Image (tube, rainbow, N blue to C red):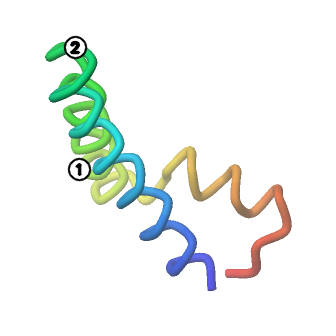
Amino acid sequence: MLNKYFRVIVGIMVLLSAVLSVYVHPNWIWFTVFIGVNLIQSAFTKWCLLETILVKLGIKK
């Protein structure tokens, strides 16, 4: 269940940052870069802030 929530939230954040970079200001693309770097970092360290937050909110692994 956690994986499902994680994927939906990350997908929404990527799409939102892409829309904001087109319609608001091009610097919003850095938010997309941050998300990508965080995903790469979590692959190596096996730790992700979003996962920690979701677990504390009561989402089951």
Eyeballing the image, is 39 above or below 37? below
- Rendering coords of residue 42 (x, y %): 36, 52
- Rendering coords of residue 20 (x, y %): 29, 29
Q: Which mark is residue 40?
A: 1
Q: Label 2, secondary structure: give it.
A: loop
Left or right of 35, for residue 55: right
Marks 2 and 1, the one that precedes in the sequence: 2
Q: Label 1, secondary structure: give it.
A: helix
Eyeballing the image, is 1 above or below 6? below
Indicate the amino acid at tag 1: Ile
Left or right of 38, for residue 7: right
The reply to whether dot 2 and dot 1 touch (C-beta < 8 Å) is: no
Q: Residue at x 59, y 58 (%)?
A: 51
Q: How many marks?
A: 2
- Rendering coords of residue 37 (x, y %): 24, 39
* Mark 1 nearby-residue class (10 Å; few <14, some 14–19, many ≥20): few
48 or 9, which lies in front? 9
Q: Quadrant of residue 19?
A: top left
Indicate the amino acid at tag 2: His
* Mark 2 nearby-residue class (10 Å; few <14, some 14–19, many ≥20): few
Q: Where is mark 2, residue-wise?
A: 25
Q: CA distance from mark 2 to mark 1?
A: 25 Å
Q: Residue at x 27, y 18 (%)?
A: 24
Eyeballing the image, is 20 above or below 46? above
Left or right of 13, for residue 60: right
Residue at the far bottom in the pictured view = 1
Q: Residue at x 75, y 80 (%)?
A: 60
Eyeballing the image, is 26 above or below 31? above
Left or right of 24, for residue 42: right
21 or 39, which lies in front? 21
